Amino acid sequence: MHDARKSPQRTGTSSLGPGSELAVRLLSVLDALEDAVFVADTEGRLLFFNRAAREIYGSSLDERIGKEWKPRNLYLPDRVTPFPADQDPPLLRAVRGETLSNVELFVRGETPEQGHDVRVNARPLLDDAGRILGAITVLRDVTLSKQRSRSLESTRRTLTSIVQSSADAIIGTDLQGLVMSWSPGAERIFGYTEEEMLGRSMNVLAVPGQVDDPLQIIKGLASGGAVEQYETIRRHKDGRTVSVAITVLPLRDARGNIEGVLGITRDISETKRLIHSEQTARAETLAERRFRQLLEAAPDAILEVDSEGKIVLLNETAEKMFGYSREELLGLSVETLVPAAMRGAHKEHRRSYTSQPLMRPMGIGLELKAQRKDGSLFPVEISLSPNRVEAGPRVIALVRDISARKEAEDRLRAIQAEHTAELAAKNLQLEARNRDVEKANRLKSEFLASMSHELRTPLHTVIGFSELLTEELEGPLTPKQKRFLGHILQDSRHLLELINEILDLSKIEAGRLELQLGPFDFASCLGEVLTGIQQQATAKNIRLENRSTFQGAIFADRLRVKEILYNLLSNAVKFTPNDGLVWVESAVRGKWLSTTVGDTGMGISPEEHESVFEKFYQVGSTTKGTREGTGLGLPITRKLVELHGGAIQVESRPSEGSRFSFTLPLAGPQET
């Protein structure tokens, strides 16, 4: 074998053998990978790397070929702390026999923003005898994933800050009215803690006999209704009622479908009490002065308008909100505070309300705006209440500036839209990457199939001519020559067996393996396999027992069933110590034949039961103390069983032997 340490070469020229077509193809596959791959020899010298590695470290890697691999600009995940100088990087640790999984590091560029967050896996490369030939390190670039996580965390903090700091109750529910989120403002207004309300129905806040049912409003919004804004009453935890102004809007998923409802609720109980005090006041008494104090302390603008639309009463908040002095507002037409484009319609609405005065929100379902003295407009919520006095019918208007709330709602919508767009873009990127991975996997399978065919042809020639030489048709051979030819035949046949396994697996993965199904006698098939495996068992003095009593036909591919049985029995013999026992038993389970291959061998730990069916996985050394084969026998066996519609499973514990059971269809009506 070519010594890569004497002639280190980088990717594209291969260090696995000068001019080796196999090496060139292998490196082409490595270059197609998204992960960076580094390989070092037993001295820790860099042998080769792939295209993804160059993208991370740049062209300086060429200078490192043949030298001890100590990567530059390597930092801990915080991007600030350099990799400890007294520690070896993962590749060198793997050369010493360590296996490292998912170690997070940062490869820094000229600035931290130009670097790469990576997840490192490293392991030693071993020969069949378990000796270390070198090591391989795989780096996965997770920069994009970490950036996305940081962005999502920033968005989450912003949303949380808005919700936590709001004096209003911000409540999220699903489409059945069950509470999914409950803000501190909601706890202050209704008395229930977040733990008490999560998962409960919004009806717990409903007042018995109340007209507006929270669940009906939620269902109406879910069926395509518009944003709801209204005033109502709700029940506090202690049983009292709370007057509230509510804005209800839908919550949509990434596809625009309504998945929940967000309600923003403000406690207007105090404002309502102030209005009530204004309606009952009669004279400039202590009660009237107290009312005036409350009126002036109200956070919303309060206006009283006569039947002619003239302002006859206001509070200090109204002066500040609209930019007029008290003297300017008294006697001013209320239409002056309405946007110019809406004044004509507002007069008609006012006359209509005067004829049928009811306490209600103004402009239900509309976005209302008011106009300041300087002409600027701002969003408002307006509640109207009739007030009958000796001077005639009047209307009290409670005006709330909702600019801050609108801004918060707009910010919430913008953040939600940005988050939705970002998720859609990330999904597109993931879909594209998945397609690339599927393409690379398909090309790998096609490459393995092609490689196996090209290697098998010369091997047949080597085996054929070696067998001719052993027949001594052209003259006698010396004992040494016979021994050499025996080694050639043994190793060539072993290599051919490994290539056939790779070819079978690649055919299965590429979907090109076709079963030749038909009914056949299972007992005779099993007998042939047991006869073929007997020599291996005899060599280790292992007792081979056929406990199968099934005498009938199964509907399967006879050649592939023999392959399944041979793989399981040869594994059982391989991992069973001398003087042990290997047996086969079968039983009918409905329309299936269940067959078990058991042994008294070394056993398998429960956490490795699924791993033994993975490609190239080897559970441990054989009874000879070495690893044998490629780790493809059991993966191929599982694929063949599943192609027949059956299933395979293992029952085993260390030092207690193993039982591999699989099912195959019986011959019968299912043959069609």
Image (cartoon, helix red, strand yellow):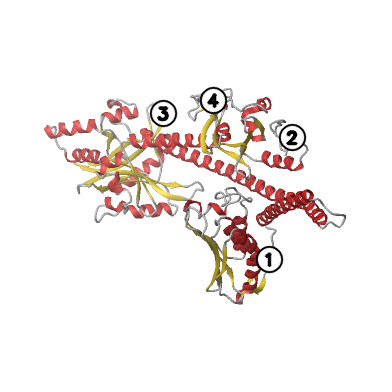
Q: Amino acid at mark 3?
A: Gly
Q: CA distance from mark 2 to mark 1?
A: 41 Å
Q: Residues within 10 Å of mark 2 (few under 14, many from 20)?
A: some
Binning the other alpha carbons within 10 Å of mark 4 as few (below 14), some (14 to 19) or many (20 upward) gives some
CA gap, disc 3 to disc 2? Answer: 77 Å
Q: Is label 1 in a helix, a strand or a loop?
A: helix
| Residue beneath disc 4 | 112
Q: Residue furthest left?
A: 286
Question: Dot 3 lies on which element?
Answer: loop
Tell me, for residue 13, which label it has, or none: 2
Q: The C terminus lies in which quarter of the figure?
A: bottom right
Could you tell which of marks 4 and 2 lies nearer the N-terminus? Answer: 2
The residue that mark 1 highlights is 559
Distance, label 3 to label 4, CA atoms, is 51 Å
Which badge, 2 or 1, is on the more N-terminal residue?
A: 2
Asked whether disc 1 touches disc 4, contact meaning CB atoms under 8 Å apart, the reply is: no
- Residue 575 numbered mark, or none: none
Horizontally, is 389 left or right of 506 in the view?
A: left
In this image, 501 relative to 260: left or right? right
